[in-house]
Image (spheres, grey):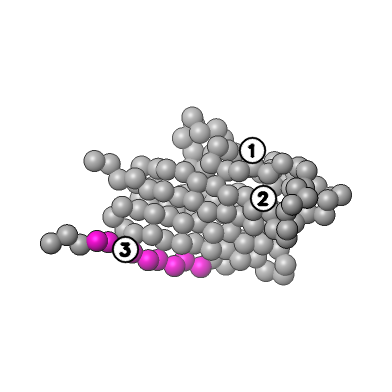
């Protein structure tokens, strides 16, 4: 049996002013520039909820771009996955991001990124990440 890994999370940005869609356009373009899933990249367009340009009148304060994918034992290539994710984040506007990695053998890991000074701007670099690890295993006797 092969090991399955599940990766999911979200990227949050400040809600756009209804008249200014430049932040959403930038974030949308960054996700649309990702390769398609058939190329087996670490990140692909299909795993993201790519935001529409129009601001939803029901939206409150934050734009939430969620994502998720199933992989075959991605934890063995996790540094490469994180490198690609941070490269994407560096192209985007955001205030925070969270990634959950669920593995069959190594438990659940949560990675969080928090921007400084009220939001990350494209090209500003990635400065701080926090990793929290929890493991829940049922032992059979």
Indicate the secondary structure of the residue bearing disc 2.
loop
Is 117 rendered above or below residue 61?
below
- Determine whether the residue tagged by mark 1 lies in a helix, strand or loop: loop
In which quadrant will I find the N terminus?
top left
Residue at 54% over, 59% down:
98
Q: Nearer the viewer, residue 108 or 54?
A: 54
Looking at the picture, how far across and down is residue 141, in whole percent? 13, 62
Point out the residue furthest to the left here: 141
Quick check: marks 3 and 1 in contact, CB under 8 Å? no
Q: Mark 1 points at which residue?
A: 33
| Whole-number angstrom distance, CA of label 3 to CA of label 1 | 36 Å
Whether residue 82 is in magenta: the answer is no
Q: Is residue 87 visible?
A: no
The residue that label 3 is drawn on is 136
Q: Splitting the image into 4 quarters, where does residue 25 fall?
A: top right
**Secondary structure found at label 3:** loop
Q: Over which residues does the magenta segment extend?
A: 130-138
Q: Which of the numbered marks, if any, corresponds to residue 91?
A: 2
- Cβ–Cβ under 8 Å for marks 2 and 1: yes
């Amino acid at each position: 049996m092969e090991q399955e890994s599940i990766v999911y999370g979200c990227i949050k940005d400040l809600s756009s002013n209804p008249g200014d869609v430049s932040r959403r356009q930038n974030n949308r373009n960054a996700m649309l520039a990702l390769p398609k899933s058939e190329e087996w990249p670490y990140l692909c367009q299909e795993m993201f909820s790519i935001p529409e340009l129009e601001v939803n009148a029901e939206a409150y304060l934050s734009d939430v771009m969620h994502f998720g994918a199933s992989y075959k034992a991605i934890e063995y290539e996790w540094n490469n996955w994180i490198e690609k994710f941070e490269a994407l984040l560096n192209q985007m506007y955001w205030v925070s991001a969270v990634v959950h990695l669920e593995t069959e053998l190594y438990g659940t890991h949560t990675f969080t990124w928090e921007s400084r000074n009220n939001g990350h701007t494209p090209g500003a670099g990635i400065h701080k990440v926090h990793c929290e690890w929890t493991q829940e295993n049922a032992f059979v006797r």
